[in-house]
Amino acid sequence: MSNDTVLVLVVITALAFDFTNGFHDTGNAMATSIATGALGPRTAVAISGVLNFVGAFLSLAVAATIASGLVATGKVTLTVVAAGLAGGIIWNLVTWLFGIPSSSSHALIGGVIGSTIAAAGGSAVLWHGLVSKVVLPAVLSPIIAAFVAACGTWLLYRITRSLTDGARKHGFRIGQIGSACVVSLAHGTNDAQKTMGVITLALIANGTVAKGSNAPVWVITCCALAIAMGTYIGGWRVIRTLGKGLVEIESPQGMAAESASAAVILLSSTFGYSLSTTHVATGSIIGTGLGKKGAEVRWNVAGRMATAWVFTLPSAAIVGATAYGIAYGIGGTIGVIIDLVILAALSGFIFWRSRATKVDHNNVNAEWTGGVSPDKVPAETAAA
Amino acid sequence: MSWINLTALWKIIVFGLIAGAGLPALFAGGLYALSLGPKTAHVRAAGVDGDIDSDVVVGGSVLGMVLAAIAFLIILAAIGWSVYEIYTLGHPAPAKK
């Protein structure tokens, strides 16, 4: 059956998205630990990968939100899902190229909404669900995270003010690693579920599983693997921006940031909000800059990120809608295949472009000089 | 249906502060307790601006170490408990549908 061919293609594309989700977001958990030297870059991404895998099995509350709360599932066809995923992947790769920690969740949701509108019109989108479950939390969560992280940072420096800098740095590194591990777990719980939700949406669209079903076990396992592998590959460009670009971070700030992120993400997950871990992590890191006397937040970097966040939903939606248009125009299975070929070609092109200004585990901590790619000074490379 | 779930919002803020700022503060308290004792006495004598370069964390006070151990155990227990809670909440019994 041709429908099953499309279903397989959709599942593969969804897992590809999950992979980009993993490497785009490694920084949310590990950027501060890498920046303060609490963990070596390679060790950090390995630990984070394992914990993302474990986290994916932890909860299914958010998967249900994506699958049923945002679009009228009856209007969703496999082509719509494939086109939506293409939108999400492209936006993730473009923002990664520029080292901007934008929300993978918004990229995915935007893509799916764009393709749904293209296929069935604006009435197929549950706008109320979109605003109350996605847009409002996206605005509020970084502010809450920044507030919690600022309070935490202030408390940590206050309580340990009699310790020497060396002792403080030493002690908090352990706490920082612990809290970063909880964030990795939370990321697996929160983000892997979004792909599970999309695959479940596709399975429902194809009639493979009944409407309102939970994600089947094979879906959970595949998603957990894809996000863990993506995390392990490590999105070094984004890690660099988060760890070095926003605030110069010390280990107490790192611990405060990761604890705040973990608490906000996990609490929101339990309420079924599909929060962007990226928004929360960025808010937390800015908060640690606000909570420490004398620390400087690079607001120009933060502003550039916020701009990208505003554009994420609509941009991914436009790509999603375009992808649907192409697939629909050509028609049938071939249309979807051509969509995915274009997607693969664009992804390859972006990857090729990224090689020109390579950021990897060797130069991720190099001095911040205003851009993602470190200046090619041999001394810095040697120091890192 | 309202646009914003205020109950969820205040819960996220309050519990977020308790877990996200309170637990690290408890960790800091543990570190402080751990630093008490004879091995770090010279650092305290020099005062905050003493500019002594030392990365000795454990001061050697038994009471301090016990208090630190209690603080660290509370933190571990809190993390373990919350992970368990998330697991139970995230896997509702299918029979209820």
Image (cartoon, rainbow, N blue to C red):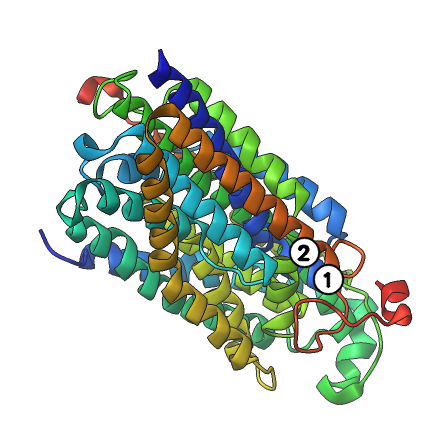
Q: Residues within 10 Å of mark 1 (few under 14, many from 20)?
A: some
Q: In the displayed structure, would residue A331 be above or below residue A169?
A: above
Q: Which mark is residue B67?
A: none
Mark 2 near mark 1, Cβ–Cβ under 8 Å?
yes
Q: CA distance from mark 2 to mark 1?
A: 6 Å
Write the residue at 68% across / 77% down: A162
* Residue A379 appears in the figure: yes
Q: Chain of mark 2?
A: A
Q: Chain of mark 1?
A: A
Q: x%, y% of residue A382?
A: 90, 64
Q: x%, y% of residue A373?
A: 71, 67
* Residue B64 appears in the figure: no
Q: Nearer the viewer, residue A272 or B14?
A: A272
Side of B86 where A186 appears, left or right: right
Residue A270, quarter of picture: top left
Write the residue at 62% across / 66% down: A241
Q: Given the image, on which type of amino acid does mark 2 rest?
A: Ser
Question: Which residue is situated farthest in the front direction here?
Answer: A330
Q: x%, y% of residue A276?
A: 41, 53
Residue A202, quarter of picture: top left
> Which element carries disc 2, helix, strand or loop?
helix
Q: Which mark is residue A354?
A: 2
Of the 4 image quadrants, the one containing the C terminus of chain A is bottom right
Q: Residues within 10 Å of mark 2 (few under 14, many from 20)?
A: some
Q: Given the image, on which type of amino acid does mark 1 rest?
A: Thr
Residue indicated by mark 1:
A357
